Image: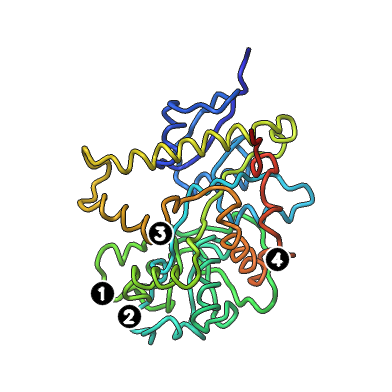
Amino acid sequence: MSRLHLTFACGDYDRTRALAEETIRPDGIDLTYLRLPVEETFFRMMRHQEFEVAELSLSSYVVSLRAENPPFVALPVFTSRMFRHGSLYCHDDAGISSPEDLRGKVVGTPEYQLTACVWMRGILGDRHGVPFDSVTYVTGGQETAGRIEKAGLDLPESVRISRIPGDKTLSAMLAEGEIDALCTPRVPSPFVAGDPRVRRVFTDVVASEKEYYAATGIFPIMHVVVIRRDVYDRHPWVAQSLYKALLAAKEEAYANLYDTSALRFMLPWLTPQLEEARAFLGRDYWSYGLEGNHETLATFLRYHHEQGLSRRLWTPEELFAPESTESAVI
C-alpha cells in the first residue's frame, strides 16, 4: 500500500535525527526531512505555508490562532526548550547593573513576538519588577538590516514599539549605545567578538537560570511541531503517527547521549553535566505531551496574552491536536 508523503522542515537536532536518517519512520508516512535554520523555517511556514509539517515558534503558532481559519494544528512536541536569561544583553554604559534597571530603557528585539522574548518579558515582570510596558522596544534585523515581523500584530497602545532605520542593525546599535539593551535568541556579533561595550544583563547566567527553575519548576518551551491544517483535516491520523515517531526519536537521543564509550558531542564533561541535569530537572527533563508541561504552557500563554499578542487567554489543551494528547491503553 502507498504511504502518505509529507515534507518536514526542522532544525538539525539529536532528538529528531532518527527521523532525518529514517531509522525511525512514522506509521504510514514517508518523510522528506529538510534541515533548515529555524528563522528560515518559521518565515517560510508563517508567510507561505510551504511545508506539510514543520517546527514552529510557540509564539508564532499562538499568534496564528487569531486567524478566522487557523492554518496549523500543533503537536505537543517541543523541539526546542531553553532557559533564556542569557538572551539579555546591554551596553556597558547604559546604567544597567541588574535586571531591575531595565525599567525605562530602550530594548531591541528582532521581532516583538519571538518566543524567547515573550518568556523574558514575562520573567522580568514576574520576578524583577520590570513590566513589559515599562520599556520602549525597537525591532529590526539583528545582523542584517531589514528584518520584519513574520506575522501581522495588533498590539495595545501601552506597547511603545517602533522599527529601527532600514540601514541599521540591532547589534551595531547596541555596540554604539544607540539602544540600551537587546533581547535576542541569537548571541549578537559584538558579544561573540569580545567587544567590551556589550555584556549580558544576568552576569551569572547558569546560577540565575537554576534559581528560576528551583522557584518555578519551569523549563521554558520554545518550539512546537505543527501540521498544516489542510493536511490534518484530510488525514487526522497523522497527528498520532507523527507524535509517536517523534517521541521514539527523542527516547533514542536520550540513550545515545548517555553512551559513555565515546563522546557524541564536543563537550569534555558531557556525561557529568547530563547526570547533573537529570538530578536537577528530572530524568525526562525534555518531556513531550501535556502531562508535566501544563504549568509551563499556561505560564507562557498568560505572558502572551498580557503582552498583547493573543486576543484571549488560551488554555494548553486548546493548542494541540486531540489525537496527540491521548492514546489507547491495554
Q: Secondary structure at mark 4?
A: loop
Calculate the distance from the C-alpha at mark 4 to the C-alpha at mark 2. 33 Å
Q: Earlier in the sequence, mark 3 or mark 1?
A: 3
- Classify 10 Å Cα crowding around label 4: few (below 14), some (14-19), many (20 and above): few
The mark found on residue 186 in the picture is: 3
- Residue 329 placement, left or right of 177: right
Residue lying at 26% horizontally and 70% vertically, measured from the top left: 195
**Can residue 43 be seen from the camera position used here?**
no
- Check the picture and name the quadrant holding the C terminus: top right
Are circles 2 and 1 on residues that touch, CB within 8 Å?
yes
Residue type of the residue flagged with mark 2: Asp
- Residue in the image at 59% along x and 28% along y: 6
The answer to whether the residue labelled 4 contacts the one labelled 1, judged by CB atoms less than 8 Å apart, is no
Q: Which disc, if any, is residue 196?
A: 1
Task: Name which of mark 3 and mark 2 comes first in the sequence.
Answer: 2
The residue type indicated by label 4 comes to Asp
Q: Which mark is residue 154?
A: 4
In percent of width and height, residue 308 lies at 67, 69
Cα separation, mark 3 vs mark 1, equals 18 Å
Q: For numbered disc 1, what is the local secondary structure?
A: loop
Instruction: From the image, tell me which residue sits under label 2.
Output: 92
Q: Is residue 78 left or right of residue 320?
A: left
**Amino acid marked by disc 3:** Arg
Q: CA distance from mark 4 to mark 1?
A: 37 Å
Camera-nearest residue between 158 and 75: 75
